[in-house]
Image: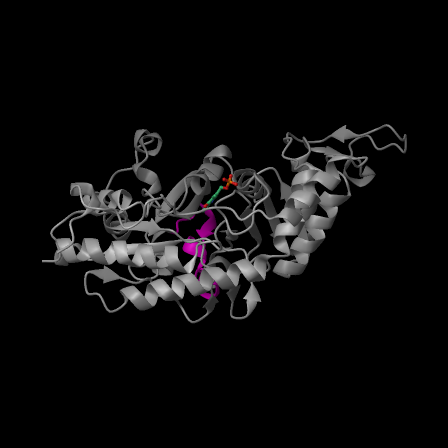
Amino acid sequence: MEELAIFGGKPVREKKIFYGRQCIEQDDVDAVVATLTGDLITCGPKVQAAEKLLCEVTGAKYAVLVSNGTAALHLAAMAAGFGPGDEVIVSSITFAASANCIRYCGATPVFADIEDDTYNIDPESIKRLITPRTKGIVAVDFTGQAVKLDEIRKICKDHGLLLIEDAAHAIGTKYKGQPVGSIADMTCFSFHPVKTVTCGEGGAITTNNERLYRHLMRLRTHGITRNQSEMAHPTDALWYNEQVELGFNYRLTDFQAALLISQLGKLSRFSQKRKEIAAKYDAAFSQMPELQVQREIPESDTTRHLYILRLNLDKLNCDRRQFFDALYAENTCPQVHYLPVYWHSYYEKLGYEKGICMNAEAFYMSSMSIPLYPTLTDEETDDVIRAVKKIVAYYRK
Ligand SMILES: *Cc1c(COP(=O)(O)O)cnc(C)c1O
């Protein structure tokens, strides 16, 4: 048996690779530089052009670009009208921002469990958590796979709830042939460098609802309007604008928008490459009883953001920590997505207890994400597979 690198053996790779990495090419660089010498470097034509392109990519009527994905979630939660006394149901396996946006509005996040095989929010768990105070749902397309949108939208319709889809992982994904972004009441995207397309920091909300769109646009710029119909003291004076509510400065610069336009042009290429790598991992791991491969629902045509390696711990003589450290030492570095949100000490202090989402907790204890990004080479993909197999062989019961 091969000696693991963590115990002094030769690592599978000499140079470390990580779970995610952006792909910036020369034409992306040129697009940014060209914008920098233009008349407007923020709030200019590139922001509008990027919003128009996002509408084309997602099929949504409206798009609002903002400074990051967390800002997108914050404004969506505000436009949804979440406030003190309201409960909002949210996935338990997600980045903290999905729940924090509910807290920003003074509302109460209620954590729903995930399905044991798709790792997405379980519609049955949502149903069990609904009370007369429930106002909405924040559903996360975890790893890029669309949540069960038909079931979740039916629950929303039956109970008068508003649906925010956190699609930070899911740009390019389709549900029953329809792009994510045009299905929920509001869909939030992130363009952080680990996500499928990036502009450094950036985010967006898409919606088909004109009222929500106008509200989001106003919240993005301090709650200030130039539209007389929204003013308490309307005037046609050219200089006049009026702050009618408390908003933020969540604007994106034009040079970031230029980068986003350039990157969106590569979405189908990036998406194809991610799918190919995920398929290669699936083929390598699906026959191994020590590992569980994520189930895809047939409705989702997934642009995979994360590849989850899930351990069947009862078939291995190690725990997740040992496996993770061994994989790290082979220089095929994994990451963990995510700690159940309510395990963070901030939420613990608010009174959330362990044990409320059993599938989420079991998932966290047995999983890690392995490298997946469009510039990962065939050789690197093979190295990851070799490293995983080497460690499984070592710890196999
Ligand atoms: C990345 C991410 C966010 C936050 O996006 P930022 O652009 O980093 O603020 C929110 N939700 C999920 C699920 C994410 O992965």
| Residue stretch rendered in magenta on the structure | 130-153
Q: Quadrant of the C terminus?
A: bottom left
The residue sitting at the right extreme is 237
Q: Nearer the viewer, residue 366 or 326?
A: 326
Please tell me whether residue 139 belongs to the stretch shown in magenta: yes
> Is 190 situated left or right of 219 in this image?
left
Using the rendered view, name the quadrant where residue 191 is placed.
top right
Q: Is residue 120 visible?
A: no
The residue sitting at the left extreme is 397
Q: Nearer the viewer, residue 6 or 155?
A: 6
- Whether 311 is drawn above or below 295: the answer is above
Q: Residue at x 81, y 35 (%)?
A: 39
Q: Residue at x 44, y 52 (%)?
A: 140
Q: Is residue 393 visible?
A: yes
> Is 53 situated left or right of 73 in this image?
right
Using the rendered view, name the quadrant where residue 229 is placed.
top right
Q: Residue 220: image x %, image y %?
A: 65, 36
Q: Residue at x 77, y 43 (%)?
A: 45
Q: Residue 289: image x %, image y %?
A: 19, 65
Q: Quadrant of the N terminus?
A: bottom left
Q: Residue 38: image x %, image y %?
A: 79, 37
Q: Nearer the viewer, residue 239 or 327?
A: 327
- Whether 259 is drawn above or below 313: the answer is above
Please tell me whether residue 201 belongs to the stretch shown in magenta: no
Q: Residue 24: image x %, image y %?
A: 57, 46
Q: Nearer the viewer, residue 218 or 259?
A: 259
